[in-house]
Image (cartoon, grey):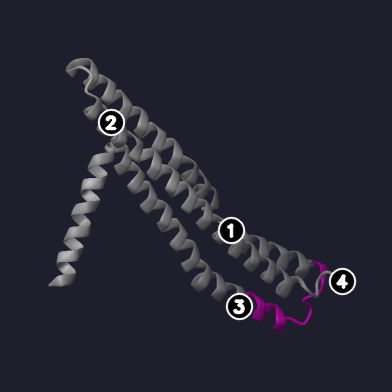
Amino acid sequence: MLIQMNDIKIYNELLVFLQTGGDVLLILFLLSIFFWTLVIEKFIYQKVNYRTISKQLRRYWKAQENADSWENIQLKTAQVSKLSIALNSNLSLMKVTISLFPLLGLLGTITGMVNVFDSMSSLGTNAKAMASGISMATIPTMAGMLLAVLGLFAYSQVDAVMKKEIRKLKDKVLKDSDA
């Protein structure tokens, strides 16, 4: 019962926060869900699919008698490249998403400021209302910058892990072929 109350409270606070920042903050929230889904997908692919395929590939080439012939070296290189492409898929989409975070945050601030100025023109200047409106207008920028920083950190970790896996595969599959 206590857990459900806390979950409802957190959900309500999240809704209030999203409403405070406006529509752009909701778009940022949805985009962040998309981004983190890509990050999780990359790690799951690397841990499950990629490792299984790379182990099968290494076992296959270890069992081959004529693995160092020119044709087989070319075949190994092509297979490693294909796995490398699969491992690096969606990394550019992650970069684009990261670059959208601060841009959408700025868009939210601009639309918020337009609303502040619009209300000032119709209701007159009220310093308290104006400060509240400006505060609400800057929330999307803060959220966009925070998401961009966290996204860059996550992307650099994902990129480093993927590069390490590719290096290990090249070393294990192509090590004897470079002679």
From what the image shows, is residue 29 above or below residue 80?
above
| Sequence-wise first label, 3 or 1 | 3
User: Are dots 3 and 2 in contact, CB under 8 Å?
Assistant: no
Could you tell me how far apart the alpha carbons at marks 3 and 4 are, in whole angstroms? 23 Å
Could you tell me how far apart the alpha carbons at marks 4 and 1 are, in whole angstroms? 29 Å
Q: Residues within 10 Å of mark 4 (few under 14, many from 20)?
A: few
Q: Amino acid at mark 2?
A: Ala
From what the image shows, is residue 11 above or below residue 58?
above
Q: Would you say 82 lies left or right of 104 here? A: right
| Position of residue 76 measured from the top left corner of the image (x, y, whole percent) | 71, 68
Residue 57, by quadrant, is bottom right
Q: Is residue 68 magenta?
A: yes
| Sequence-wise first label, 2 or 4 | 2
Specify the segment rendered in magenta: 57-70
Q: Would you say 33 lies left or right of 166 here? A: left
Q: Secondary structure at mark 3?
A: helix
Determine if residue 169 is in view: yes
User: Are dots 1 and 2 in contact, CB under 8 Å?
Assistant: no
